[in-house]
Image (cartoon, helix red, strand yellow):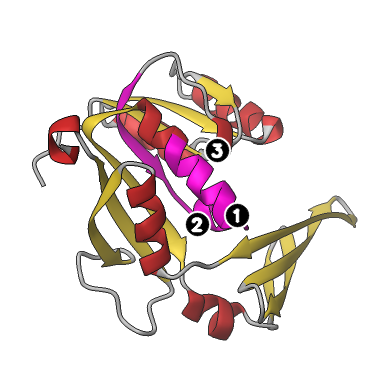
Amino acid sequence: MNHSSGITLDLACGTGSLTLELKKRGIDVYGIDGSAAMLSVAQQKAAELGMSVLFLCQQMQSIDLYGTVDTVVCALDSINHLTSEKDVLAAFQRVSLFLNPGGLFIFDMNTLYKHRTVLSNHIFVYDTDPVYCVWQNHFEEKTDRVGIQLDFFARDGGVYRRSSEHFFERAYEPRKIGELLKTAGLETIAVYDDMSFEAPRPESERLVVVSKKISQIENG
């Protein structure tokens, strides 16, 4: 795949870990996320590293950039947080709008196998001092959504402070994702098993999708 990263957008960048790693590697990158709280942490991390990075607070479905980019990355199953095909298509269309012809859109996503089998209705407990975490899942068969409840207990002196998060993720068939990408003017180049360049397996828990902005010549 002969592609220069050029100007890169880290979509749904969260607290900026990937954004800052790309910056360290000399890539011209900026980040977008829908959470102002997460972006505040990202800015603080950048400042501590002495880096100047632009972070914008926008939703994936309605990004509005100052200009076009050459590469868009979207990691840590952020696409799964879009729980309707309408929202996924809207996000893909906005990416396509601001992606230069021939530019790459690379993202990962949790699979139906992971939602149905690994997460399902299971409960996970992580005891990692100073934080104790209880992760509860509720799988909805009809929608392929998983409701995720996270309860954190952080040690603060002699007591534990509790904080909670609740959100939904939806898994999509790769075929459907390919259709939505095509509708948005993006061509699927490759789909890989997570952390490899191997083909997906039936029990793959996460996939990496590489797509390309279709140029007018290719469309024609």
In the figure, 43 relative to 135: above or below? above
- Asked whether disc 1 touches disc 2, contact meaning CB atoms under 8 Å apart, the reply is yes
Q: Is 104 covered by the magenta stretch?
A: no
Q: Position of residue 162 (x, y in %)?
A: 86, 56
Q: Residue furthest right?
A: 159
The quarter holding residue 27 reads: top left
Q: Determine the residue positioned at 50% across, 35% down.
A: 16
Q: Is residue 87 magenta?
A: yes
Relative placement, left or right, of 184 versus 119 is left
**Which residue matches tag 3?**
60
Image position, residue 145 (x, y; %): 65, 70
* Residue farthest toward the front in the current orientation of the protein: 220
* Mark 3 or mark 1: whose residue is earlier in sequence: 3
Q: Secondary structure at mark 3?
A: helix
Residue 205: where, in percent of width, then height? 43, 74
Location of mark 2 (residue): 77
Q: Work out whether residue 57 or residue 98 is closer to the camera in this orientation and state it.
A: 98
Q: What is the magenta range? A: 68-93
| Comes first in the chain, label 2 or label 3 | 3
